[in-house]
Image (cartoon, rainbow, N blue to C red):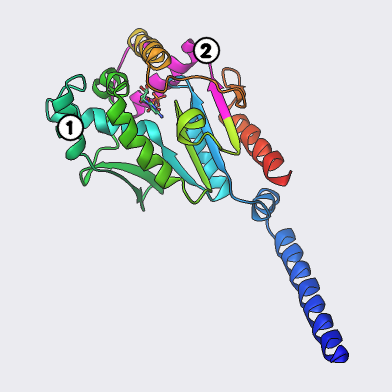
């Protein structure tokens, strides 16, 4: 009996040694960033911050590098605002909110040609339309409504249930994922944010003056920060990243370094 156990013990130990060696060799074959990711546990990364400071584009790239799912919670509020606009519903009238929510279905689908995730409203691709100024001007009002937030937050929590997710928005670290392992709060001065947003809009064929964009960003910041339902706040355990003087890849690298620290400890 003792010799059988000894034999089994040796076999198991030998197998473990071999697996560890294989894992190390495999990890060494991969590039340095991928190697770090390969050995990490999956976490939830919550990115909050002011309008137009590059949260979504940064979150998307971080998710890509980590092999995580990216969820743009702002796109969900934008799609809801578009839905209310299309049906001529007022987010401030309770009966309209009920009708709007009952007929609202938001989903994300990967575009195989661009490799980018796109937003669908009731089965229709609205990715481009939700980024227009028409929607930007209405979205923050829609986002003040308690019932609308409750519905979208529940969907966001469902999407992030299995971890391995990067979600950006205004209330991700405070309400959607208060237990997120890494919480970030992104900022940038309003001039920089307006300039970046103007380039984004120009690339999509929309010509909007810097002044108009700046006003929209400031208005949304004001409404988002002062609403009674889940206002935009920097929670105590969030790490602030000011992107005013950072390049895009510097932003991404800073976050990847933080992910490394959180997952290795
Ligand atoms: O991309 P940008 O920073 O312009 O905004 P967004 O992330 O697309 O969000 C659009 C609007 O949705 C915000 O101004 C908020 O009013 C609302 N929002 C929110 O209330 N809570 C979130 N988690 C995400 C967005």
Residue 27, quarter of the rendered image: bottom right
- The quadrant of the picture occupied by the C terminus is top right
Foreground: disc 2 or disc 1: 1
In the picture, measured across the screen, residue 4 lies left or right of residue 242, that is right
In the picture, measured across the screen, residue 34 lies left or right of residue 146, that is right
Q: CA distance from mark 2 to mark 1?
A: 38 Å
Residue 155, quarter of the rendered image: top left
Q: Give coordinates of residue 147: x percent, y percent.
A: 28, 29
Depth order, front residue of 52/176? 176
Q: Determine if the magenta segment contains residue 154.
A: no
Residue 259, quarter of the rendered image: top right
Q: Give coordinates of residue 170: x percent, y percent.
A: 44, 25
Q: Quadrant of ligand 1?
A: top left
Label 2 CA crowd tier, 10 Å (few <14, some 14–19, many 20+) = some
Depth order, front residue of 116/143? 143
Q: Which segment is the magenta one?
A: 184-210
- The quadrant of the picture occupied by the N terminus is bottom right
Report the disc number at residue 255.
none
Report the disc number at residue 98.
1
The structure residue drawn at horizontal position 62% and vertical position 27%, both measured from the top left corner, is 237
Q: Residue furthest toward the left?
A: 88
The structure residue drawn at horizontal position 65% and vertical position 52%, both measured from the top left corner, is 34
**CB under 8 Å between discs 2 and 1:** no
**Helix, strand or loop at disc 1?**
helix
Give above or below for 120 relative to 173: below
Give above or below for 147 relative to 115: above
**Helix, strand or loop at disc 2?**
loop
Q: Give coordinates of residue 15: x percent, y percent.
A: 76, 77
Residue for badge 2: 189
Q: Determine if the magenta segment contains residue 202.
A: yes
């Amino acid at each position: 009996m003792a010799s059988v156990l000894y034999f089994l013990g040796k076999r198991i130990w030998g197998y473990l040694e071999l697996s560890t060696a294989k894992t190390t060799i495999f990890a060494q074959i991969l590039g340095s960033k991928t190697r770090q990711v390969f050995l990490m546990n999956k976490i939830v990364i919550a990115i909050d911050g002011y309008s137009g400071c590059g949260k979504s584009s940064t979150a998307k790239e971080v998710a890509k590098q980590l092999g995580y799912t990216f969820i743009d919670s702002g796109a969900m509020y934008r799609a809801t605002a578009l839905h209310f606009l299309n049906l001529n519903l007022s987010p401030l009238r309770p009966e309209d909110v009920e009708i709007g929510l009952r007929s609202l279905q938001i989903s994300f689908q990967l575009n195989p040609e661009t490799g980018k995730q796109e937003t669908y409203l009731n089965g229709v691709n609205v990715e481009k339309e939700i980024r227009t100024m028409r929607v930007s001007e209405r979205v923050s009002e829609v986002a003040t409504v308690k019932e609308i937030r409750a519905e979208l937050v529940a969907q966001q929590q469902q999407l992030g249930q299995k971890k391995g997710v990067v979600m950006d928005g205004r209330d991700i670290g405070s309400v959607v994922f208060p237990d997120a392992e890494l919480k970030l709060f992104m900022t940038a001065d309003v001039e920089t944010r307006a300039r970046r947003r103007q380039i984004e809009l120009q690339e999509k064929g929309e010509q909007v003056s810097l002044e108009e964009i700046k006003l929209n960003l400031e208005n949304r910041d004001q409404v988002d920060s002062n609403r009674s339902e889940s206002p935009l706040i920097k929670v105590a355990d969030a790490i602030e990243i000011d992107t005013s003087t950072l390049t895009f890849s510097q932003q991404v690298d800073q976050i990847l370094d933080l992910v490394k620290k959180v997952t290795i400890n």
